[in-house]
Amino acid sequence: MTAPAASSAQPPAAAPPHVPSRNDLLESLAVIAGAQWRDFAAAAAHQGLTSMQAKLLGQLVRPLPMRELAALLGCDASNVTGIVDRLEAQGLARREADPHDRRVKRVIATPEGKETIRRVRADMHVMHSALSALDDEERAALYRLVERMRPALDV
């Protein structure tokens, strides 16, 4: 009895993975960004803030000049003045003179303001649920990719 002849047929090659275009990625990111913004606004309202008040408060990881806040928020400096006035009235932020140029006013989150924005982010149930759909390895990979993109966004 002879051994069967070896087959010369190669197993079929796996199809190359679909590589999404930049437009495909932008569309997906737009959906995520829209959901994130709606969730953020709802969580801000739960804390008694407008979405713009919470957005401004979230930018205050360090003291920022009013003009820089206006640029970050994409609004006029006079709008920032009104938002900061309301945050100050709630004890969530305060103004101080810049130590290098006393004509410039910087905005600082108070300890209560920092705790409030922490609660807003903790209250974002839609986004927390979406992120929970990822396992630890996927969340780590997503984090690395997002952090890799950040420098190009000037944030």
Image: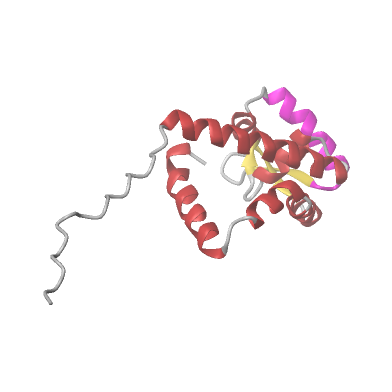
Residue 1 x/y as whole percent: 13, 77
* Residue 11 x %, y %: 25, 55
Q: Which residue, as the protein is rendered here, is positioned at the far bottom?
A: 1
x, y percent for residue 45:
85, 40
User: Farthest residue toward the front?
Assistant: 1
Q: Residue at (87%, 44%) from the top-left corner?
A: 46
* Residue 89 vertical placement versus 140 (above, below): above
Residue 89 included in the magenta stretch of the image: yes
Quick check: 97 left or right of 154? right
Q: Residue 94 occupies which quadrant of the picture?
A: top right
What are the residue bounds of the magenta stretch? 77-92
Residue drawn at (73%, 49%) of the image = 109
Q: How many marks?
A: 0
* The quarter of the displayed image where residue 20 is located: top left
Along the line of sight, which residue is nearer the eye, 108 or 43? 43
Residue 87 seen from this side: yes
Residue 103 visible at all: no
For residue 17, above or below residue 135: above
User: Along the line of sight, which residue is nearer the eye, 144 or 68?
Assistant: 144
Rendered residue at 46%/55% (across/down)? 144
At a point 55% along the width and 58% down the height, the residue shown is: 139
Judge by depth and name the residue closer to the eye, 114 or 34: 34
**Residue 81 percent coordinates (x, y):** 75, 29
In this rendering, position of residue 103 left or right of residue 40:
left
Q: In the rendered structure, does residue 86 fall within the stretch colored magenta?
A: yes
Coloring basis for residues: secondary structure
Of helix, strand and loop, which mostly describes the magenta segment? helix
